[in-house]
Structures are given as structure tokens and as C-alpha cells.
Amino acid sequence: MHELSICAAIARIVADNAAGRTVTRVTLDVGALRQVVPDTLAHAWGVAVMGTSLEGSILDVNHIPAVIECSRCGASTAIEVPVFRCPCGSTDTTVSSGRELMVRSLELEAA
Amino acid sequence: MGRFHRLPEGGVEVHDHGSVSDAPTSGRGAVGDHSAYASTGPARVEVLEQILGENEATAAANRQDFETLGVRVLNVMSSPGAGKTTLLCRAFEHLPPRLRVGVIEGDIETAIDADRLAATGVPVALINTSKGFGGECHLDATMVRSVLGELPLAELDLVVVENVGNLVCPAEFDVGEHARMMVYSITEGEEKPLKYPVMFRAAEVVAVNKIDLLPHLDFDLGQFQANLRDVNPSAQVMLTSARTGEGLDGLCRWLESVASGG
């Protein structure tokens, strides 16, 4: 359960970027290869921001699928299950997306 | 993936998106329009900051300090009860005395494992995450940094970080290590690499431990190795038993190669 420490890190980034304005929505990019559970994240966000200026803000998660690139045939393949093998049979692959864990944007209330 | 609706006190909404370019846009202010700070209307501000960026910066500082002092660091991870501590104790007794080893021991509670490792003669720094770190189920770079002064780093060749027993969280947090090893015990089931792919991908060596139990279990070693290759084709597998000593020679040779920067 590392969602709480992730939320604490998100809250620090948001506070630094909000410049004192009220935040209504925080949008994250979370890759499929990150072990973040959405409803645990929701609960942790409520706890992490309780009693702070971020209380009541919405956490919005963009799910980014896992994609591997094959070093042998060059194909890009989205994977649903954690089998890092190209349809051509090669296991010589690199992950081109799915490791994202980023605060993408904020929405701020009218001042 | 379901959609989570607004909660009264903070909430989350989850969407599925095909790619980064599908990120939602808002009519209420242009992405990256930092003039929003000065305006009075609602606004959307692009941030693009890595959530674990602070941990990664601290991990880089740790790694720099280790390199300045000429010590290499190995992060050892496993589920609770896989046998990390016992395997490390046997390995430390088996290593040539010229190799100077220290330990950073991570546990939520107690000094039980730290005491066992210290009994082998190595210096040990203990992190109990229940004391000041919110009972976290992993070590992070800041926790490791907080105990660096407790080890004679300049006199050591190798520091082994024994992470908190957990197959999920430790894989997400770089602590400044140079290599990662997993200890997996054959009592855990063949499917674990598929269930915890992030952890199994994070390790360059997987010690398949308690191998002495093989005749007594229905464990299918070939299936486990196939599952591991699906998730991490380059992982090096070592069959080990702290009880019989099987695999200790190979493990110790690998520890020496990590210590020498190999």
C-alpha cells in the first residue's frame, strides 16, 4: 500500500504549481505497469488532502497502456497481460509506454 | 476499468485512454498557458512532473555518495517469509573475509532480522518504517539516506539493503542501489511472476530459494521458469537453499561481482 506516499508526493507537486489558487481537478498519467490501484488511490487522496487547501479536489487518472517494441522485427505491440514477448516470438523487447507516473495538469477555480 | 464518481471530500475519476494524446483537454484555459496564474477565470495548467521525481533525485544523491566512497549497493526484495534474512546470513558466512559487507535492514517493526544479520559479524543499520516513516511497506531513498551515517561506508565493498518483505511496493522505489535481487521461495507457487510482473522485472537475479523442499511439493520448476522468462527474459536464476547450502557458491560469486562493479 504505497498509494498514500504517492498521494503525498502528488499533493506536494500540486501545491507547488497551484500558486495559492484553489485546485478543482488534478489529472495524472498512470501507466499499466505501475502498481497503483485506482480506488485505493481515491481513498488515499481523500486522506492525504483532508484539512488542506486541496480538500474536495478531484483526482483524474489517464490510464496509459503498456506497449512493447521488438528489437528484432520493430513491431509495437500493446500488451494486456504481463508477457513481454513480441507476436513474432522474440523476447528481445523494450517497454515504450506503461511506466508513466506523472502529474499532467491542474484545473484551478476562478479566483 | 470502472469510472469513479465524485466523492464529497476529494475523489477520483478513472478513464481509459488509448494513449497520452488522449489526455482530456478543457475549454477553460489552454494547456501550458501559465498566464492563468495572473488571470481570475478558471484555468487548466500543464504540470508534467514525475510523481516519484523527489525520490529519484534522492536515490541519485545516495548513488553518488556510494560511488564517491567506493561502495556498491544491492537491493534485495521478496515477499515476507521467502527467506531473505536466512539466505543472506548463510551467504555472509560463506563469503571470503576480504569482502567487507554492511547491511541496511528494512522492517516495519522489530530488530529481529537486524540482530540475526549482525550476529554474522557485519555492521547493520536498521530502518523500522513504523518509527517516523508511517509504517510504510517499502524502503525509499529518503529512509536509506537517513541511516547512511550509521555504516562505515568508506570501509565497505558492498552494502546489502534488505527491503521490507512485500512483492509490490519496493519495486517502485529506487533507493540508490546498483543491482537488484529477488528471493523467491518455491512454496509461493509457479504463477507469482505473472501476478507481480513489476517486481520480477525489476530483478536481475532471482534466487529460487528453499529448493531443498522440491521433493516434498507439487511445485513445477519448469513452469515457474517459463513464467519468469515471459516477464523477465534476462533474469538470471539461482537455485538456492539456506538450509542445505545449495547454490551458495554461485550466489557468493555474484555478490562479489556486484561488489567489484561487475
Image (spheres, rainbow, N blue to C red):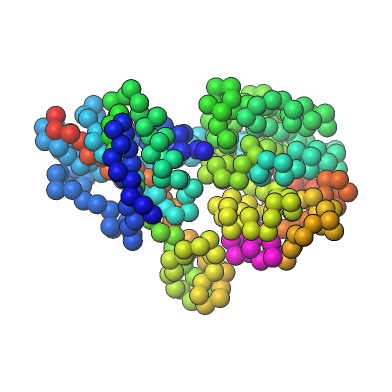
Residue that appears at 64% across and 58% down: B191
The one nearer the camera, B223 or A18, is: B223
Magenta-drawn stretch contains B224:
yes
In what quadrant of the picture does the N terminus of chain B appear? bottom left
| Location of residue B242 (image quadrant) | top right
| Location of residue B111 (image quadrant) | top right
Q: Is residue A32 above or below residue B39?
A: below
Q: Position of residue B232 (x, y in %)?
A: 60, 60
Residue that appears at 56% across and 76% down: A89
- Residue B254 in view: no
The one nearer the camera, B148 or A106, is: A106
Left or right side of A83 for B88 = right
Q: Position of residue A65 (x, y in %)?
A: 41, 59
Left or right side of B137 for B56 = left
Q: Residue furthest right?
A: B244
Query: Which segment did they paint magenta?
Result: B223-236
Left or right side of B159 for B2 = left
Magenta: predominant secondary structure element? helix
Residue that appears at 54% across and 26% down: B133
Residue that appears at 28% across and 57% down: B22
Q: Is residue B247 above or below residue A58?
A: below
The one nearer the camera, B215 or B44, is: B215
**Number of marks:** 0
Q: Position of residue B140 (x, y in %)?
A: 55, 35
Q: Position of residue B91 (x, y in %)?
A: 81, 43
Magenta-drawn stretch contains A97:
no
- Residue A5 in view: yes
The one nearer the camera, A11 or B15, is: B15
